[in-house]
Image: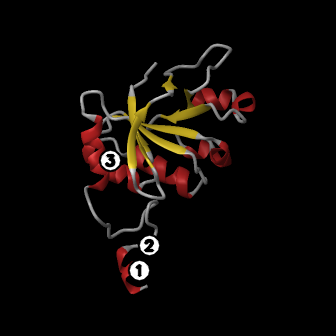
Amino acid sequence: MVKTPHIVKLDRSSGQYEVIANHWLRVAEGCDDAIPAHTLLPLKEWLERRDELLDRADVGIWFAPDDEPEALGADAARLSMIAVDFPAFTDGRGFSIGRLLRERYGFEGELRAVGDVFKDTMYYLKRCGFDAFEVRADKDVHEAAKGLNDFSDAYQGAVDQPLPLFRRRSA
C-alpha cells in the first residue's frame, strides 16, 4: 500500500495549483471482499471486479506502465480518479497513457501522476492532461509544484493547449 501525505492539485481551468492532503490509498495487489473508500486499485483488479465497482466514485484505478488504456476503453469516462505510475524518470510510457485517457477515451476526472514524479517532470505531465501529482518522498512538494510554471508557453499542441503556437498567433 502506498499513501503520500500531500499531493499537488492543479485547477485545469485557471492553471492555479495548491498542495492538499492526499485521501487516496494505492494498493499494489487486490483487496479482499470489501474495498474501502478512496482506494486506487490496479487496472487488472478493477477489470476483474468491474461490474461491482463501475458506479463507485470513491474507488479509482491505477495504471502500471505496461497497462493499455484500451483495456479500460469507454469506462474511463465514468471514473472519477485514475492514477498512472511512473516507476522511473526514464520511463515515459505514462505520458502516453495520460494523453490517451484524456483525448481518446474522454476521461475528465482527476488524473494523477504517481511514482518518480518531481519538479522537472511537472510541466510536461500537465501538458499531457495530468492535474494531480504525488511528488517523490525525497523531494519538497512545494518546490516541485513550481515546476508547473517552468515555461510561459509551448510551441506544440497538447491536452492543456490543443492549438500549436503558430495557429494561436494567426488567429
Q: Which residue has dot 1 on it?
A: 167
Amino acid type, residue under disc 2 in the picture: Leu
Q: Is residue 59 shown left or right of residue 20?
A: right
Q: Which residue has dot 2 on it?
A: 163
How dense is the environment of label 3, judged by Cα within 10 Å: few (below 14), some, or many (20 and up)?
many
Q: Earlier in the sequence, mark 1 or mark 3?
A: 3
User: Do the residues bearing badges 3 and 2 touch, measured as CB atoms within 8 Å?
Assistant: no
| Residue 18 visible in the snapshot | yes
Q: Quadrant of residue 41?
A: top right
Q: Earlier in the sequence, mark 3 or mark 2?
A: 3
Q: Position of residue 64 (x, y in %)?
A: 46, 34
How dense is the environment of label 1, judged by Cα within 10 Å: few (below 14), some, or many (20 and up)?
few
Q: Secondary structure at mark 1?
A: helix
Work out whether 140 lies above or below 1.
below
Amino acid type, residue under disc 3 in the picture: Met
Q: CA distance from mark 1 to mark 2?
A: 6 Å
Work out whether 167 lies above or below 120.
below
User: Do the residues bearing badges 1 and 2 touch, measured as CB atoms within 8 Å?
Assistant: yes
Name the residue rendered at 44%, 58% in the picture. Answer: 14
Q: Secondary structure at mark 2?
A: loop
Amino acid type, residue under disc 1 in the picture: Arg
Q: Which residue has dot 3 on it?
A: 122
Name the residue rendered at 27%, 48% in the picture. Answer: 146
